[in-house]
């Protein structure tokens, strides 16, 4: 038998082929089979030493995370013809690439910290390649911190809204939008944030949407507040009526302040600026 004829050629099933919308974009449900995803790992191992070295460990991961392995490999091998292309294979200060650092952490995280993989998959599902890569570069160390699992689980349903808020609009030729996206996520998964408050954000934004005009929500203050959940939920119920009352009296209304304390802060900052956005103080929804 010819040596050349014995070489197995692996055929991948890609997910990011062709034109990809920029900014916030929801990808179709990943319907690739386990067999196809294992084939993808074999394919990437042929030309990526990072994958080849850990191929067996990657293939033995929880099948629900094999799609993420394939997505990260595909992103690392994808080059955008843009000023904002992020080369995941470029060696950094410690002599290792972002791609290598991620691949090394995936097998262990799949067993001990699965929520960070679930969250990362949701980010990839809701953003373009540039935002996905920027996020991956920002959360490498998070793979080793399972204590953030509750925060990640509570914040995962918000990823789509966060992406739409921060990544919308035209191409800016820099990473300002991606930075805002990551900074807002960092606000939610901060160790000082309360997971139960993060889970209440959809209720907060829904109540705020019933109030006429532009009303900023200061998420950093909301998720870090020590106000009991029961009190917050009661305040949310009367939020629209309270806002209407303050409007009739010509008073400034601070949504976050009211929900946290059921009092009005007349001198609270109402205009959103760049620093406020960087700190995560933006309205979702």
Image: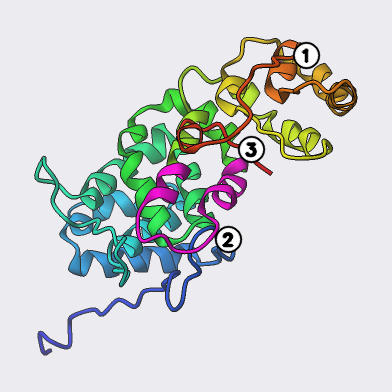
Q: Which residue is mark 2?
A: 26
Per the image, label 2 sits on a secondary structure element best described as loop
Which marked residue is nearer to the observer: mark 2 or mark 3? Answer: 3
Residue contact at pointers 3 and 1, CB within 8 angstroms: no
In-front residue for pair 163/262: 262
Relative to 36, does residue 242 appear above or below in the rendering? above
Is residue 231 at all visible to an observer of this figure? yes
Calculate the distance from the C-alpha at mark 2 to the C-alpha at mark 1: 34 Å
Mark 2 Cα within 10 Å, few/some/many (few <14, many 20+)? some
Q: Which mark is residue 64?
A: none
Boundaries of the magenta span: 158-181
Q: Which residue is mark 1?
A: 230
**Which residue does the image show at 86% across and 24% down from the upper left?**
237
Question: Where, quadrant-wise, is the N terminus in this rendering?
Answer: bottom left
Calculate the distance from the C-alpha at mark 2 to the C-alpha at mark 3: 20 Å
Residue contact at pointers 2 and 3, CB within 8 angstroms: no
Q: Which mark is residue 283?
A: 3
Q: Quadrant of residue 78?
A: bottom left
Q: Position of residue 15 (x, y in %)?
A: 45, 69
Calculate the distance from the C-alpha at mark 3 to the C-alpha at mark 1: 22 Å
N-term-proximal mark, 3 vs 1: 1
Q: How many marks?
A: 3
Q: Is 219 colored magenta in this rendering?
A: no
Q: Quadrant of residue 59?
A: bottom left
């Amino acid at each position: 038998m010819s040596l050349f004829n014995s070489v197995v050629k692996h055929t991948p099933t890609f997910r990011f082929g062709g034109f990809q919308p920029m900014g916030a974009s929801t990808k179709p449900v990943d319907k690739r089979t386990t067999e196809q995803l294992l084939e993808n790992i074999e394919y990437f191992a042929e030309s990526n030493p990072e994958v080849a070295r850990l191929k067996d460990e990657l293939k033995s991961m929880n099948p629900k995370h094999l799609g993420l392995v394939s997505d990260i490999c595909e992103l690392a091998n994808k080059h955008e013809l843009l000023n904002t292309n992020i080369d995941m294979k470029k060696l950094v200060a410690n002599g290792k690439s972002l791609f290598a650092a991620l691949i090394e952490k995936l097998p262990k995280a799949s067993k001990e910290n699965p929520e960070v993989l679930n969250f990362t998959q949701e980010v990839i599902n809701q953003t373009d390649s540039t935002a996905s890569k920027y996020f991956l570069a920002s959360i490498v160390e998070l793979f080793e911190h399972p204590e953030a699992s509750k925060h990640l689980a509570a914040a995962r349903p918000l990823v789509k809204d966060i992406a739409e808020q921060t990544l919308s609009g035209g191409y800016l030729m820099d990473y300002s939008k991606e930075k805002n996206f990551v900074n807002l996520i960092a606000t939610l998964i901060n160790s000082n944030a309360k997971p139960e408050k993060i889970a209440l954000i959809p209720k907060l934004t829904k109540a705020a949407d019933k109030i006429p005009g532009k009303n900023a929500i200061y998420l950093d203050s909301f998720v870090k507040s020590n106000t009991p959940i029961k009190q917050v939920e009661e305040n949310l119920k009367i939020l629209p009526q309270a806002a209407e009352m303050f409007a009739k009296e010509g008073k400034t209304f601070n949504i976050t302040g009211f929900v946290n304390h059921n009092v009005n802060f007349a001198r609270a900052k109402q205009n959103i600026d760049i620093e406020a956005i960087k700190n995560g103080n933006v309205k979702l929804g």
